[in-house]
Every structure is written in C-alpha cells, then in structure tokens.
C-alpha cells in the first residue's frame, strides 16, 4: 500500500501536465492539483482505515496524525490567507495562493474525516446508548 501511495504522489504532476498539454480545457482544479490532492488524501484515508482495523494499537497514533494534519493545514491556510491581503510580487502571490488552496483542501478533508469518524458521538443519544 505504501508503494502505491508513493507512486500515485509521484505521478500526479505528470498526469496534470499530460492533461493540460493534450488540448484539454484549462481547469483550475487540474492546474492547482486539487483533484490530485483529493485522490492522495482519499488513499491516505483508506490506508489509515485499513491500518486501524488490522493493527488496533495504531489507532491512537493515527488519530494523533490526523489531528496534527488538521491543525497544521488549518494554521497554514489561515496564515497564507492573511498574507494574501498584503501587497506583494505576482509570483509570490501565486505561490501563496496555491499553498492557501492546498492547505484549505487538506484541512477540509481532515475535518470532514474527523467529523465522519465521530458523527455518532456528536449526537447525545448515540453516546448514551454506547455507555460513553
């Protein structure tokens, strides 16, 4: 599974360039690798779900990793968002915008995954039934 994730991550830029150079209509989702990032995050999510089921002792570390990803991506998204409000060179603005989009997408994915994993305990009736 690790080799598959690494291979997918390495092929993303080449796939985006091939799609862009093949006469495909220009898309901000392709240009900013948003779809590719979502695919990689989906693969990482699937891998963590498999690992959690096969190695229950890893559950706490997986949660910690996802929590750190959520916090770090949120902080970087906020900082780059505020930095975009200041005057700067066009190249730097474009790079900051990419980081803002990428970390925003990662924060959104991690947040939604976090919510989905704990949706039952967000409703008080389900937590009482499970004795939590």
Image: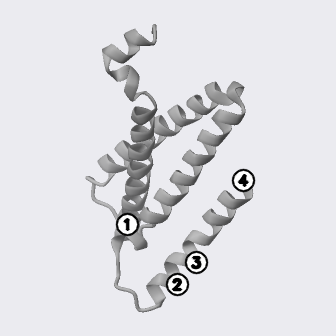
Q: Secondary structure at mark 2?
A: helix
Residue at numbered disc 2: 18
Q: Nearer the viewer, mark 2 or mark 4?
A: 4
Q: Secondary structure at mark 1?
A: helix
Residue 125 vs residue 57, the one in the foreground: 125
Please tell me the numbered disc located at residue 2: 4
Please tell me the numbered disc located at residue 94: 1
* Label 3 environment density (alpha carbons within 10 Å; few <14, some 14–19, many ≥20): few
Which quadrant would residue 27 be assigned to in this image? bottom left
**Given the current orientation, which residue lies at the most extreme front position?**
129
Q: Earlier in the sequence, mark 3 or mark 1?
A: 3
Mark 3–mark 4 Cα distance, whole angstroms, equals 20 Å
**Residue at x 35%, y 63% (from the top left corner):** 93
Q: Earlier in the sequence, mark 2 or mark 4?
A: 4
Q: Is residue 116 above or below residue 25?
A: above
Circle 2/circle 3 CB separation < 8 Å? yes
Q: Is residue 63 above or below residue 48?
A: above
């Amino acid at each position: 599974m690790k080799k598959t994730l690494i291979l997918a991550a390495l092929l993303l830029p080449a796939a985006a360039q091939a799609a862009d150079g093949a006469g495909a209509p220009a898309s901000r989702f392709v240009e900013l690798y948003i779809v590719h990032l979502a695919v990689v995050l989906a693969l990482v999510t699937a891998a963590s779900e498999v690992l959690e089921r096969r190695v229950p002792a890893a559950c706490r570390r997986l949660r910690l990793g996802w929590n750190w990803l959520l916090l770090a991506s949120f902080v970087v998204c906020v900082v780059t968002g505020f930095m975009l409000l200041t005057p700067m060179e066009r190249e730097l603005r474009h790079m900051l915008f990419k980081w803002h989009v990428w970390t925003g997408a990662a924060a959104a994915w991690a947040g939604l995954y976090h919510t989905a994993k704990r949706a039952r305990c967000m409703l008080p009736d389900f937590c009482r039934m499970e004795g939590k």
